[in-house]
Image: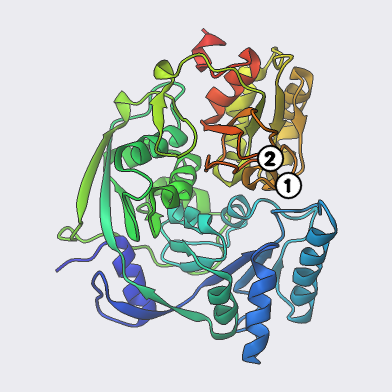
């Protein structure tokens, strides 16, 4: 019996010839990730073990959720991480001013590679499947143990094959692809399964599209999302990844629980209405809904291509007088590139505010909390009740084109309403 991409990677890291769904295995880890919220409790568990870190180059600590610190409590949490990194000489510790949103930063810095097994104490660690790695989120206890041992247990997930055909039409992005998929199968449609993206349509997706799609695999309940490695992947990692890596591809006779086919040619920009990412409608199906805020950024859509899409809409235009528009570059490198290309000037002249890289409002942290009754269009990944502030606020998920158009018109809007 053949194996999927995920099964092959897990088998290799478990030292086994093959694995099958449901099997319990222990795998060696290539990377262990934590942030300023999840690392402090992981450190407590780590300290109980009484061992040194397994490898100070394979632990990555990124204070990005409540940093720059929003209050005393967040400052204390960041201090705990900082002191741990110094004590254990963690090579990949990213301080404020050198950091980024973790799932933008790690691929950018070449810390994740094809064939890797990566765990992170953050649910969107699945982002790294875009480069052909097995990456998944874990709890802080698992992170703490893994920092000491360098391995962890997995139950091998079964897989759903997502076959992509065609090419994306104008204004349609990876965000629309993944929201469409979640709308098709639901937020629990891939529960503890691997979403494996295949088909000739993969070649039509940029790395930014793939990173966005893999990022939101967890919103379908998936254990991980993963793409095959192709020339687009290799070009992206060529000057980034310095270590040796091993690509995998699914066997022709790999077994899948389900096959879902998406014709990219037929997609349109979509919006996920409150309060679930599965509540998806095409932009033409969304009634006229006035909004109060737009957030463009996050680990889902904070890359330079995302900002470019927003700038394309906002150039020479103004944010609607009733709208607060918040732009959050995903990393310092993205911020600098946006400056060089003139995007930051475009945003500020349009009447938007530009933030330092941070998760900020995505998880209701800061930099854009919603009051009761307020509505936001956001390029973030979740729109659960109270996710971005008050329980009586509403979050509408969309890609950068729709978010920027909505900022201009003061209501949920299609990009062609702004640009003919």
The residue lying toward the viewer, choosing from 117 and 291, is: 291
Tell me which residue sits at (53%, 75%) in the image: 142
Looking at the rendered structure, the secondary structure element under dot 1 is: helix
The mark tally for this picture is: 2
Which residue is at the far bottom? 50
Q: Is residue 390 above or below residue 235?
A: above
Tell me which residue sits at (39%, 26%) in the image: 281
Give the number of the mark in front: 1 or 2.
2
Task: Name the side, left or right, on which 395 lies relative to 343.
Answer: left
Tell me which residue sits at (61%, 40%) in the image: 391
Which residue corresponds to mark 2? 329
Q: Quadrant of residue 378?
A: top right
Q: Quadrant of the N terminus?
A: bottom left
Q: Is residue 351 above or below residue 364?
A: above
Q: Quadrant of residue 257?
A: bottom left
Task: Name the side, left or right, on which 416 lies relative to 351.
Answer: left
Check disc 1: other Cα within 10 Å, few if <14, some if 14-19, many if 20+. some
Colour pattern of the rendering: rainbow
The x, y position of residue 182, in whole percent, is 37, 41
Which residue corresponds to mark 1? 332
The residue lying toward the viewer, choosing from 381 and 383, is: 383
CB contact under 8 Å: marks 1 and 2:
yes
Check disc 2: other Cα within 10 Å, few if <14, some if 14-19, many if 20+. many
The residue lying toward the viewer, choosing from 290 and 417, is: 290
């Amino acid at each position: 019996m053949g194996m999927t991409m995920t099964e092959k990677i897990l088998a290799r890291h478990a030292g086994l010839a093959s694995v099958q769904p449901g099997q319990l295995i222990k795998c060696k880890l290539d990377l262990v990730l934590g942030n300023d919220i999840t690392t402090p409790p992981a450190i407590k568990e780590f300290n109980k073990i009484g061992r040194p870190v397994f490898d100070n180059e394979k632990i990555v600590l990124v204070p990005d959720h409540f940093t720059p610190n929003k209050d005393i409590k967040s400052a204390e949490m960041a201090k705990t991480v900082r002191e741990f990194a110094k004590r254990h000489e963690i090579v990949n510790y990213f301080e404020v001013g050198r950091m980024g949103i973790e799932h933008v930063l790690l691929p950018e810095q070449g810390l994740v590679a094809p064939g890797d097994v990566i765990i992170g104490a953050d649910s969107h660690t699945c982002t790294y499947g875009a480069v052909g790695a097995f990456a998944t989120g874990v709890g802080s206890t698992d992170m703490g143990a893994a920092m000491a041992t360098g391995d962890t247990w997995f139950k091998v997930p079964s897989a759903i094959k997502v076959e992509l055909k065609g090419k994306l039409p104008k204004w349609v992005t990876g965000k629309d692809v993944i929201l469409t998929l979640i709308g098709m199968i639901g937020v629990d449609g891939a529960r503890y399964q691997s979403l494996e993206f295949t088909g000739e349509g993969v070649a039509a997706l940029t790395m930014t599209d793939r990173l966005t799609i893999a990022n939101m695999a967890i919103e379908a309940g998936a254990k991980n999302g993963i793409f095959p490695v192709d020339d687009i992947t290799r070009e992206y990692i060529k000057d980034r990844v310095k270590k040796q890596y091993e690509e995998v591809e699914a066997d022709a006779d790999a077994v899948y629980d389900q096959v879902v086919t998406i014709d990219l040619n037929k997609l349109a920009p979509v919006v996920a209405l409150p309060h679930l990412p599965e509540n998806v409608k095409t932009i033409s199906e969304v009634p006229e809904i006035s909004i109060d805020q737009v957030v463009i950024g996050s680990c889902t859509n904070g890359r330079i291509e995302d900002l470019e899409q927003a700038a394309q809409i906002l150039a020479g235009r103004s944010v609607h007088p009733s709208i607060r528009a918040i732009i959050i570059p995903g990393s310092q490198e993205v911020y600098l590139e946006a400056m060089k290309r003139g995007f930051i000037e475009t945003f500020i002249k349009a009447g938007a505010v530009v933030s330092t890289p941070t998760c900020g409002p995505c998880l209701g942290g800061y930099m854009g909390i919603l009051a009761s009754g307020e509505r936001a269009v956001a390029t973030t990944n979740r729109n659960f009740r109270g996710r971005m502030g008050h329980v009586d606020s509403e979050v509408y998920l969309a890609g950068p084109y729709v978010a920027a158009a909505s900022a201009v018109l003061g209501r949920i809007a299609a990009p062609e309403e702004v640009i003919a």
